[in-house]
Image: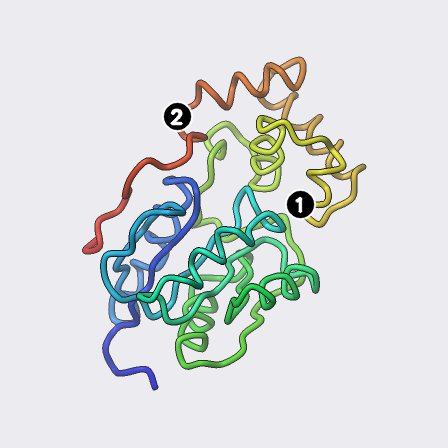
Amino acid sequence: MVSAQPIRVAAVNDYELVVAGVAALLGRYPDRFRVVDALVVGEPILEPVDVALFDTFGRVRLANEALGWLVNQEAVDKIAIFSLSLSPEVIEDGRAVGADGFISKALDGDSIADAIEAVARGEEVVAGAPDTDSPNEQLEWPGRAQGLTQRESEVLVMMSRGYTNAEIATALFIGTETVKTHVRRVLTKLKLRNRAQAGSFVERTGSFGPGNGRSVSPTD
């Protein structure tokens, strides 16, 4: 049973910019949530968490290892996956690892807040459309300042890690032709010629670096 106190939420991802954006969105509801942590995957969780909101940016199907880490944290009560894709495969994979809820990034802030509260109450939550390329505008992601959509940014991140188009398609639950379209758009928007230059861009751009520490204090 959830008390009348604000729900304690941790925003979790590999990228500080991503977790900072999620924390800022939840910070609009101080009477409903207290962001006790905004952390990158693998960091110690410093105090009890009612709901860990796991942002799948850059992972999706590749998220199971990180989800397993969260499930094994005694300080975490419930886990909600926060994703552009709520396909049946995402839900099946997440439930197999131990996720308690699934929330679309396309929802408005109030709907996201309602869904997190439902997860905290112990309800089985699937909130939002199966798939989208248009996340809530209040969220942040690497490359947004350069005009990349979140999906394009995810594709760029995976390109830089050496994934093929087929591997990216599998990871993001999209078709290979869709991946090719995203790759072309990424190269055009960033004025790059090839995947090697894309990898160099990611390497030298600070916002694409994996987080190395907490980006938002628990009181923010």
Residue 161: x, y in percent?
58, 29
Q: What colour scheme does the image use? A: rainbow
Q: Give the residue at mark 2.
A: 206
Q: Mark 1 falls on what kind of element?
A: helix
Eye-nearest disc, 1 or 2 = 1
Kindly report the distance in space between the C-alpha atoms of the residues bearing marks 1 and 2: 24 Å
Under mark 2, the amino acid is: Gly
Residue nearer the viewer, 211 or 82: 211
The residue positioned 69% from the left and 29% from the top of the image is 183
The residue positioned 67% from the left and 16% from the top of the image is 194
Left or right of 15 on screen, residue 133: right
- State whether residue 136 is above or below residue 142: below
Residue 29: x, y in percent?
30, 65
The residue positioned 60% from the left and 33% from the top of the image is 158
- Alpha-carbon neighbours of circle 1 within 10 Å: few (<14), some, or many (≥20)? some
Residue nearer the viewer, 70 or 52: 70
Q: Give the residue at mark 1.
A: 171
